[in-house]
Image (tube, grey):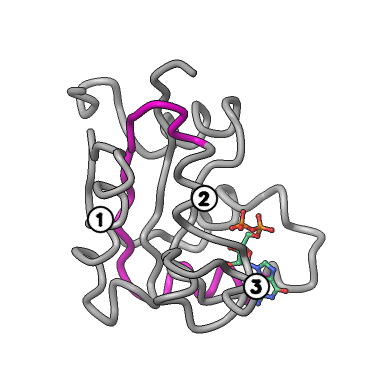
């Protein structure tokens, strides 16, 4: 597998509980390198655009309100097979179903407040990175 880049968010439930370093340590231990990182707070419009694919889902409003409730840390992770590796380290969406040792198993509070976001494919990774980072911020 080639070296890939993927997009990650450390969500409000995790930044609020001071878990940024603990979560980054999980990425690094899995061989993922943080090649860009910044702490921001999204506007409602930005959250609605970012999660636009879920706009018909019953939890859309709750999800967007949650994502703007506190600052988040947006990151680009790089490594061998980074998209799948990040999803593996994150664990299942619902922490009750997440495997031992995964971020969501250890830190997530619920299916909604589940500590991390990670791109689910090559196209979404490229789109999500470009939504939050300019080329100048990606130093590799
Ligand atoms: P992911 O790729 O594992 O993050 O999962 P999805 O793409 O299916 O969902 C996106 C995000 O929406 C999840 O990470 C959760 O924060 C949220 N979400 C998904 N399902 C539910 C749900 O049933 N209730 C609530 N409140 N939030 C949900």
Left or right: 38, with 5 as reference point? left
Q: Indicate the position of residue 69 as horizontal and vertical percent values.
A: 41, 76
Establish if 96 lies above or below 77: below
Decide whether residue 70 is among the magenta residues.
Answer: yes
Q: Is residue 130 magenta?
A: no
Q: Which mark is residue 66?
A: none
| Helix, strand or loop at mark 3 | helix
Q: Residue at x 30, y 57 (%)?
A: 26
How packed is label 1: few (under 14 Cα within 10 Å), some, or many (20 or more)?
A: some
10 Å crowding of disc 3: few (<14), some (14-19), many (20+) = few
- In the image, the segment drawn in magenta is 61-83
Q: Identify the residue at image location x=58%, y=33%.
A: 124
Q: Quadrant of ligand 1?
A: bottom right
The residue mark sitting in front, 1 or 2, is 2
Whichever of labels 1 and 3 marks the residue nearer the N terminus, that label is 1
Q: Which quadrant of the view contains residue 36?
A: top left
In-image side of 15 versus 53 (left or right): left
Disc 1 designates what residue? 24
1 or 3: mark nearer the eye = 3
The label on residue 97 is 3
Between 31 and 128, the residue placed more toward the observer is 31
Left or right of 103 in this view: 87: right
* Mark 2: C-beta under 8 Å from nearest atom of ligand 1: no
The quarter of the image holding the C terminus is top left
- Label 2 or label 3, whichever comes before in sequence order: 2
The residue drawn where x is 59% and y is 56% is 48
- Name the spot of residue 117 as percent of width and height, x first: 49, 55
In the structure shown, which secondary structural element does the residue marked by tag 2 occupy?
helix
Q: Which residue is mark 2?
A: 88
């Amino acid at each position: 597998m080639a070296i890939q880049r993927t997009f990650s968010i450390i969500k409000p439930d995790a930044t609020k509980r001071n878990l940024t370093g603990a979560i980054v340590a999980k990425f690094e231990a899995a061989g993922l390198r943080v090649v860009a990182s910044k702490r921001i707070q999204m506007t409602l419009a930005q959250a609605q655009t970012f999660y636009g694919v879920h706009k018909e889902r019953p939890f859309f409003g709750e999800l967007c309100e949650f994502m703007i409730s506190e600052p988040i840390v947006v990151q680009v992770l790089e490594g061998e097979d980074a998209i799948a590796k990040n999803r593996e380290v994150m664990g299942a969406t619902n922490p009750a179903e997440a495997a031992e040792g995964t971020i969501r198993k250890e830190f997530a509070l619920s299916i909604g407040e589940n500590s991390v976001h990670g791109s689910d494919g090559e196209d979404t990774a490229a789109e999500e990175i470009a939504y939050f980072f300019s080329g100048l911020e990606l130093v590799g």
